[in-house]
Amino acid sequence: MTNIGSLYIHVPFCVRKCPYCAFYSRSYSKEAVGRYLDGLEMEIQWWKDRGIFPGPLKTIYIGGGTPSILTPCEWDRFIDIIAGHFTIETQAEVTVEANPDSVTPDLLSIWKNWYISRISLGVQSLDEHEIEWLNRPYSKEHVCKTLDMIKEYPFSLSCDLMFTIAGQTLRKWYENLSGLIHTWDPEHLSIYQLTLEHGTPWGMLPPEGITDGYGPYRFAQWYLPLKGYGQYEIASFAREEHICRHNLAYWYQENVIGLGPSAWGYLDGLRYSNAKELDTYLSSLRSKSQKGAWSYSEYLDNRKKAREAAILALRTSKGFNCREFRERFGSQSINEILDILDNIPDHLCCHKRDRVYLTSRGMRVANAIWEQLV
């Protein structure tokens, strides 16, 4: 029986599309949300009909889009669907993504009374001008009031912050980090460099003034550990015992079922993605296709699984254990990987006893190192 302990659910609705965002989302409407929830039930049943029934679940991640845009009634139905089909561990890590403009006391109460244990809040910046430049649908006042509200509840709080914003000096970046930490003390921080993705408005017509990312990232690597946040993953820092377990399920190539339009999943070497558009996703499910809502699938052979596992593990501060890799993938695969990594300077990639991992300097140039393994 396939062991599946993690679930990702994509909620594809937003107030409006940010110009740099490459994730699938569409405008909110009650009618569209109703059809989406119908599809979610159909997709879960499709998996059950094939004997794949995850659980008890150790982690659930509800992402988007903007899951917090759903109304309390819509959240009640969403929870009924998940609770009616899955068993969830008592101590499960259940994360929901939210934006400052759509979090309400009613939603927080619903989440508190279910299994939600983490909120990942898309702060991005505490600077009013930076928020406006990013075309985010809220103000600094929204951010501050929402953070105050969340801290009244027993959630673990994760905040996203973005760097390389036009006009962002190292001083402004420091003020974003320090202001967030000293005022609200989130348990987890995810920092992202603004990237211009293909197919997005800014990918097609880049804005002026985007700054270099090396300095802000290096500063965060120095500053955040001083404030008690360990870097456990390329873009994530957490206080002790608040590492995101769902993130690690991805980086250690564990099985994750993905539900909803555009969701990705991985099952014992099978990687798949669902149809991107809501209407296509729904029509695929209604057609009773043997592939359900999938628009893409690939079965990785042993060599590809090993290479991918190494790349994913090197996103983390612990990297991978050579002995365990040899047991999983065989001597030939691990030797090929080590031959490539042996050409990376020791100050970037460290091979200590049986463990291989990127140093702090290596994480700053991680893309160039991962490309060697593709």
Image (cartoon, helix red, strand yellow):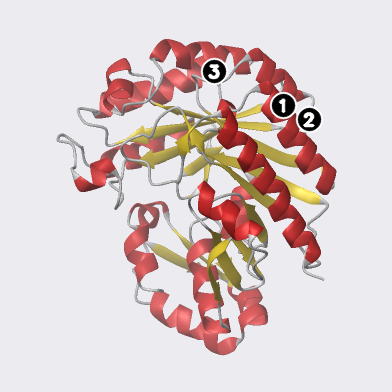
Residue 100 is left or right of residue 36, and the answer is left
Q: Which mark is residue 111?
A: 1
Q: Nearer the viewer, mark 3 or mark 1?
A: 1
Q: Which mark is residue 184?
A: 3
Query: How far, Cα to Cα, is label 3 from label 1?
Result: 20 Å
Q: Residues within 10 Å of mark 2 (few under 14, many from 20)?
A: few
Q: Secondary structure at mark 2?
A: loop
Q: Is residue 344 visible?
A: yes
Residue at image point 67% right, 80% down? 327
Residue 42 in the image, given as x and y percentages of width and height: 71, 52
Residue 53 in the image, given as x and y percentages of width and height: 80, 59
Residue at image point 79% right, 36% down? 80
Residue 262 is left or right of residue 57, and the answer is left
Residue at the limit of the structure toward the left, as seen here = 208
Kind of residue at badge 3 = Trp
Q: Which mark is residue 114?
A: 2
Q: Secondary structure at mark 1?
A: helix
Q: Answer yes or no: do the residues labelled 1 and 2 have beta carbons within 8 Å? A: yes
Residue 256 is left or right of residue 280, and the answer is right
Residue at image point 28% right, 46% down? 196
Residue at image point 63% right, 62% down? 287
